[in-house]
Image (cartoon, grey):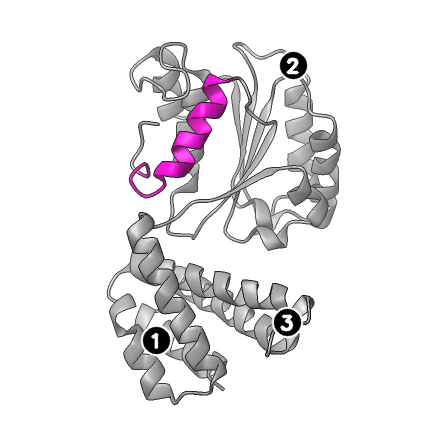
Amino acid sequence: MRFKYQSDNENLTERLERMVKTGTVSHAYIFEGSGYVDKKAFAESFAKGILCPIARGDGCGSCGICNKVDHGNHEDIMYISASGGSIKDADIIRMQEALKSKPFGDRHIVIIENSDTMTLRAQNRLLKTLEEPPGASVIMLLSENMENLTQTIRSRCVKYRINCFGSEGYDFMMEKAEKVAAMVLERKPFYQLKKEIDDVTAGSEETAGFLDSMEIVFRNMLLESGKGISRYSKDELTGNIYAIEEARRKIKSGISRPYAMKDLLVKIGG
């Protein structure tokens, strides 16, 4: 696929290209990624790969269809985004009505931004569409945290994580997150924790990648806790995940990264 995240998500883009070329595109996807990742651009690139008549799977980037996608005015692509802080039942009704019409081209594509802000009622209504997808439509749910979507929604979608970094950078960040998580749960002093993360507060992508990795580490521990094989309590791990999400929200609202990370360490470090 011709887009700027290929180097950071090469395996994912190659997998999506194969799906298009082999005709195995699913009717619904969840693309999860940090708030610093342009998930809309990622979804639009996938849409070009699906709709482009010249370079199926890849998208030529220059034909009329690709140009329409780039300008956000393709007739068969519908965008849904949060209004007033959430996506509501009426938004999904509007989508369902649009999907009843015949597409101008091969299929309808729906891109739902901030899908994890959907109200429960909206999610239940969307579920009906996912259970009986109309025609060859493709619905893409963009999310910062898919855990905020109901299990029934998640179970009916193909789920992928969009990384901030390439595989080498991702491995480095996961190793750092695992080390810091272990230090937190071993009650290491604050100054040691702060020293360990000094290098990930320098840039927004580094901070976002570290927060993502930390959340993955604690989520994995939470799964182990549910199986009775973790040394740490469910409440302790859940509290740490919540603190990470809170730090991410603070940074998005304009609070400085060093301050938000310092506050995070205080909360999870006890």
Dividing the picture into quadrants, the one containing residue 229 is bottom right
Tag in front: 3 or 2:
3
- Residue 128 lies, with reference to residue 133, above or below; the image says below
User: Is label 2 in a helix, a strand or a loop?
Assistant: loop
Instruction: Give neighbour class at mark 2: few <14, some 14-19, many 20+ (Cα, 10 Å).
Output: few
Residue where numbered disc 1 is placed: 259
Residue at the image position 57 percent from the left and 20 percent from the top: 108
Q: Is residue 201 visible?
A: no
Regarding mark 1 in the picture, which secondary structure is present there? helix
Which residue is rendered at x = 74% and y = 45% of the image? 121
Q: Residue at x 38, y 47 (%)?
A: 37
Say if 242 sits above or below 102 in the image: below
**Amino acid type at mark 2:** Ser
Q: CA distance from mark 2 to mark 1?
A: 50 Å
| Disc with the residue nearer the chain's start (1 vs 3) | 3
Q: Which residue is mark 2?
A: 101
- Residue 219 place in picture, x, y as percent: 55, 63
> Does the stretch in magenta take in 68?
no
Disc 1 crowd, CA 10 A, few/some/many (<14, 14-19, 20+): some
Mark closer to the observer (1, 3): 3
x, y percent for residue 126 = 69, 36
Does 16 sit above or below residue 168? Answer: above
Q: Quadrant of the N terminus?
A: top left
| Element marked by disc 3 | loop
Distance from label 3 to label 2 (Cα)?
Answer: 51 Å
| Residue, disc 3 | 229
Range drawn in magenta: 5-22
Observer-nearest residue: 56 or 106? 56
